[in-house]
Image (spheres, rainbow, N blue to C red):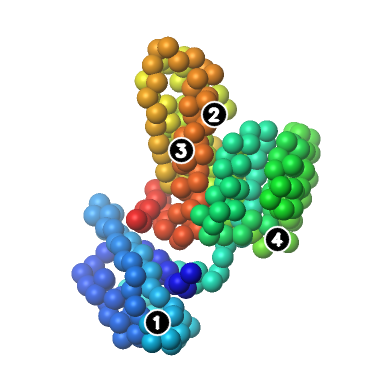
Amino acid sequence: MKETAVLLIDCPDRKGLVARVASLLFERGANILHADQHQDHELGLFFMRVEFALNGSDGRAFDLQGFEAAFAPLAQQLAMHWNLVSTRQRQRVALFCSQYLHCMADLLHRWHTGELAGEIPLIISNHRSVEPLAAFYGIPFEHIPLTAATRAEAEARQLDLLARHGIDLVVLARYMQILSPAFVARYPAAIINVHHSFLPAFTGARPYHAAHARGVKLIGATSHYVTEVLDDGPIIEQDVARISHRDQVEDLVARGRDLERVVLARAVRWHLDRRILCYGNKTVVFD
């Protein structure tokens, strides 16, 4: 696989930003493979993603550290927030789930086939239902039961495991527990959840029942980053399916599970490919 680097930028918008970045990459001998940008005209913000090769056609390796040193003064001058990473640095992902395993099974299959560019060194659940699946894929499993009385102790154990495994991203693959603000603060814009409705409609634990009671004709699923406010984090991906008056709650649940798998997998893949920038309560997802 071709080794690449990804440069993510957000900053106040002004003329010439693309040219300044591209010129410096050209001067340092970079071969740009993909480039995309977005302007939020209302807020006056600029966002950019550039992916470039680290091993050139001439066989010489790109000097990533040298470019980083050269780019830093330009970034400071233009008030840029920026992040530069190599695809050699594979992010480490922890998967959390409860008793519903459809999203977990889908993610593990995609990871096993190479679709998700990360490592999964840890699966955590408050039930043992997922343990055979974790064993099948050879991934360490930790069973951490949760009650109202033991929540603080359980979260402390979870955070310790995440730290010991060097986790970069936490994925809640239908983990039916609310994380504390202290937990969320440890992983800003690095906890992805899937919610089984088209947010902001039907938040909470029983959205399919609420959708059926309301008689909607579309149901959806949403993947989003977790914040302190329940089901209110920056949305990464959504999808919908059409239903009718003939569909019962069980039908909505079955149709919804397919949507949940897809939107969660897309969100995780885009995060691992470093295609997402957060600002405010919104995201920019680059193609």
Residue found farthest to the top: 246
Q: Nearer the viewer, residue 189 or 261?
A: 261
Among numbered discs 3 and 4, the one appearing first in the sequence: 4
CA–CA distance between discs 3 and 1? Answer: 39 Å
3 vs 1, front mark:
1
Task: Determine contact: label 4, label 1, CB under 8 Å.
Answer: no
CA–CA distance between discs 2 and 3? Answer: 13 Å
- Residue type at the position of mark 3: Thr
- Residue type at the position of mark 4: His
Residue to which mark 1 is pinned: 56
SS under mark 4: loop
Q: Which mark is residue 115?
A: none
Q: Which mark is residue 204?
A: 2
Residue to which mark 4 is pinned: 165
- Residue type at the position of mark 1: Gly
Horizontally, residue 47 falls left or right of residue 246, namely left
2 vs 3, front mark:
3
Q: Which mark is residue 222?
A: 3
